[in-house]
Image (cartoon, helix red, strand yellow):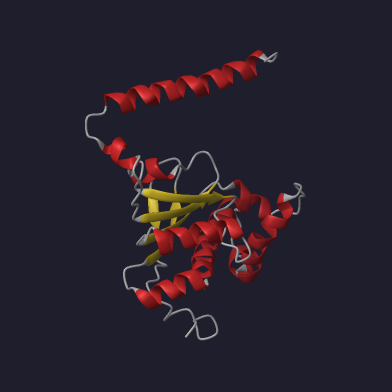
């Protein structure tokens, strides 16, 4: 590469992998050899693509314990085939038991959705967050401090995405077949690392409302 900074950055990636390979080779538990044969995670994590919120580190879990899908602002959009494919595989093949939708304070996507500025093609994605604002506009507009407005929209967005996930046919059909599947909404404080339960857990479609709950 002609650009030395790019070359050094790429070398750090390769060196990081060498260090990881060395760590794996010295592990005596046999867990990596077991992981090479397959995975059996109990958790599906739907989180933000932000680089500061890696699922394993935040939950204190090891490789193989969390199945992960991440996008801008941890959205659950019913027409998103990437998300639906991950969800279907996690629920129906891996038989995961806990689904966590994890937002985080300081989310740039949510903050951008509260502005009138254009950012590019992502504006079409952010419209789904603006819809969450529209539903809760009275509550959010009553908050004077801008940062607190964003924080509250982050929390409300997580709750709406939990609801969206529970209204998918994938989750509801799974609930018809088994009673060991829960969907949770949580939010991360990046500064402290704390993962807070927002109290919006669903284990059946009983509380979704008749128009959303499939028979």
Please tell me which residue is depicted at 62% across the width and 71% down the height of the picture.
135
Q: 159 above or below 41?
A: below
Q: Is residue 184 visible?
A: no
**Where residue 51 appears, x then y in whole percent?**
53, 39
**Quarter of the view holding residue 74:** bottom right
**Where residue 90 appears, x then y in whole percent?**
43, 58
Q: Residue furthest left?
A: 29
Image quadrant in which the N terminus is located: top right
Q: 140 above or below 148?
A: below
Please tell me which residue is depicted at 66% across the width and 68% down the height of the picture.
134
Q: 20 above or below 4?
A: below
Is residue 99 found left or right of 31 in the rendered image? right
Is residue 180 found left or right of 138 in the rendered image? left
Q: Nearer the viewer, residue 208 or 133?
A: 208
Q: Residue furthest front?
A: 37
Q: Nearer the viewer, residue 120 or 39?
A: 39
How many dots with numbers? 0
Q: Nearer the viewer, residue 105 or 100?
A: 100
**Where residue 87 appears, x then y in whole percent?**
48, 60
Please tell me which residue is depicted at 58% across the width and 16% down the height of the picture.
8
**Quarter of the view holding residue 130:** bottom right
**Where residue 170 appears, x then y in whole percent?**
48, 69
Q: 64 above or below 202?
A: above
Q: Nearer the viewer, residue 9 or 53?
A: 9
Is residue 30 found left or right of 39 in the rendered image? left
Q: Is residue 32 visible?
A: yes
């Amino acid at each position: 590469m002609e650009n030395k900074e790019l070359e050094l950055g790429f070398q750090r990636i390769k060196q990081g992998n060498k260090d990881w390979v060395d760590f794996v080779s010295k592990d005596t538990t046999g867990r990596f050899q077991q992981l090479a044969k397959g995975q059996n995670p109990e958790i599906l994590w739907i989180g933000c693509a932000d680089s500061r919120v890696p699922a394993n580190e935040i939950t204190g879990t090891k490789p193989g314990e969390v199945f992960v899908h991440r996008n801008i602002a941890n959205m659950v959009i019913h027409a998103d085939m990437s998300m639906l494919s991950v969800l279907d595989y996690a629920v129906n093949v891996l038989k995961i038991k806990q689904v966590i939708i994890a937002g985080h304070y300081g989310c740039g996507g949510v903050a951008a959705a509260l502005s009138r500025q254009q950012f590019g093609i992502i504006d079409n994605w952010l419209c789904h967050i603006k819809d969450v604002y529209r539903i809760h506009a009275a509550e959010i507009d009553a908050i004077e401090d801008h940062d607190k407005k964003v924080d509250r929209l982050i929390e409300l967005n997580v709750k709406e995405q939990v609801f969206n996930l529970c209204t998918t046919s994938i989750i509801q059909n799974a609930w018809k077949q088994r009673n060991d599947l829960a969907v949770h909404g949580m939010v991360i404080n990046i500064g402290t690392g704390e993962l807070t339960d927002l109290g919006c857990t669903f284990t059946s479609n009983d509380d979704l409302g008749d128009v959303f709950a499939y028979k």
